[in-house]
Structures are given as C-alpha cells and as structure tokens.
Image (spheres, rainbow, N blue to C red):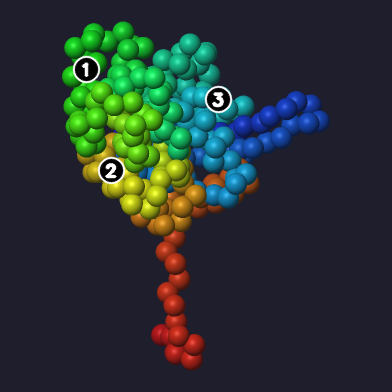
Amino acid sequence: MPAPVLELAGLTKEFGAGDNVLRILHGIDCTVYAGELVGIVGASGSGKTTLLNILGCLDRPTAGVYSLSGRDVARLDDDELARVRNRSIGFVFQSFQLIPQLTVLENVELPLFYEGAPRKTRHGRSEALLASVGMSHRLGSFPPQLSGGECQRVAIARALVNQPALLLADEPTGNLDSKNGAEVMELFRSLHRQGRTIVMVTHNPEIARELPRVVEMHDGRIVRDGPPARPAAHVPVGKAVG
C-alpha cells in the first residue's frame, strides 16, 4: 500500500462566533495515498472550496487533524504554512494566476526564486518542466501572448517546479474550450501515470467520470467516495430486463 500523502480526521470548519456560528465542514474523514488522482465534486455551497483552501494551507480547520506527508499542518503558524505551501504543495487555478510582466520561464522559476535556489538550478529545472508540458518554444513569451491552454500548461509547470508532494487543481479546465480542456486533462492523466498525487475540484461531470476516484460532497459532508458514478444504462421502453 502506498504511503498516505494527506490524511483528514474529524476536520471541521466554522465561521463566526457565539450565536452566529456557521459550520461549513462537518467532521471530514479522508485519506489520499501517494500516486492517486482524486476528484472532489459537489454543488455550489457543498464545502469544496473551503476544503480545498484547507488542503492548500490557505486556511486552518476549526477542529480536527490535517496531516500532510505525515506532518500535522493544521496548527502551524503563518510562516510555517507559507513554507509548506511553497515546498510541499503545487497549485493550479482556473484563472492560471500567472504574472503578466514576467516571461513564461520567469513565471515557472518563481517558487524556486522564493526558496533562494541558484539561478542555474532555477533555469535548468524550469526549462525541463516547460519542455515536458510542450512549452519549450515559449520560454521568452509573456502570458498575454499565450492562449488559455498554453497558460494552463505554464501554470502546471510552475506548480511542479518545487517537486511538491501534492498537486491541487481548482477547476483547471474551467476557462478553456473543449479542445484545450481535453489536452490539459490528458496532461493531468500523464502526471498521474508518472506517480504524481493530484486532488482536483471540478464541476464538470464528464471530467469527473474519467477520474479513478471521486469524493462527492453535500452540505459540508462527504456523501460518496470511490469510483465515479456511471450514467444509468438506457433501457428501451417495453423491453424486459433480466
């Protein structure tokens, strides 16, 4: 059995105080193992975004345990959380979050720059990752010169540059047309085959059906966790079954 990358136990998130407490997450229990590709699905207001923020160390739970690669990160202070975000978690956003004034290469190098990595190391690792996502011909281009699909490929390379334990993707195809969306999803499947651990939030039922494991949320609780639900087979009216 692969080692757990993230473990959630009794994870709860509340906002407000006193008589105005609003509970968003209700005792979430979930384990994601190394090399898994997991989708998180659910209607708006189900708690997906709150959960993703906690997984990405952008927020803290009110109660419960969040263990990342064996370390309880739920109670770290702000500086420690920032280090975990930069070193252990890669983020891919729907809106790409690239810096328009920086070149493609400079955008990918940024996490390494914050770590104080030498220039040669930053260049070498970033160029290799950009080649792996088919963007080696765009090193000196700026984000406004790229298509949406190209921007997302650059964002994926940037998310991987610090060799994170966990890759989080928030609606990674949400701003892409069907062709570019399919290409980006194939890239995620390729990363999964390489052994990357990926947790992906998606509203797209077609994408969810292609994932090996889906966690479905409703009103702040996990209501299903396993292989994706398949559409019911169509049975012509009047035809006997069985």
Amino acid type of the residue tagged 2 in the rendering:
Leu
Q: Are marks 1 and 2 in contact (CB under 8 Å)?
A: no
SS at mark 2 in the image: helix
Residue 183: x and y in percent read: 30, 47
Residue 81: x and y in percent read: 47, 17
Q: Is residue 72 left or right of residue 19?
A: left
Which residue is located at x 21 percent, y 17 percent? Answer: 123
Residue 4: x and y in percent read: 36, 34
Nearer to us: label 1 or label 2: 1
Mark 2 Cα within 10 Å, few/some/many (few <14, many 20+)? some
Mark 1 Cα within 10 Å, few/some/many (few <14, many 20+)? some
Which residue is located at x 22 percent, y 37 percent? Answer: 134
Mark 3 Cα within 10 Å, few/some/many (few <14, many 20+)? some
Front in this rendered view, residue 110 or 33: 110
Q: Is residue 52 left or right of residue 140?
A: right
SS at mark 1 in the image: helix
CA distance for labels 1 and 2: 22 Å
Nearer to us: label 1 or label 3: 1
The numbered disc on residue 123 is 1
Amino acid type of the residue tagged 3 in the rendering:
Asp
Residue 130: x and y in percent read: 23, 30
Q: Earlier in the sequence, mark 1 or mark 3?
A: 3
Which residue is located at x 34 percent, y 32 percent? Answer: 145
- Residue matched to label 2: 187
- Residue matched to label 3: 59
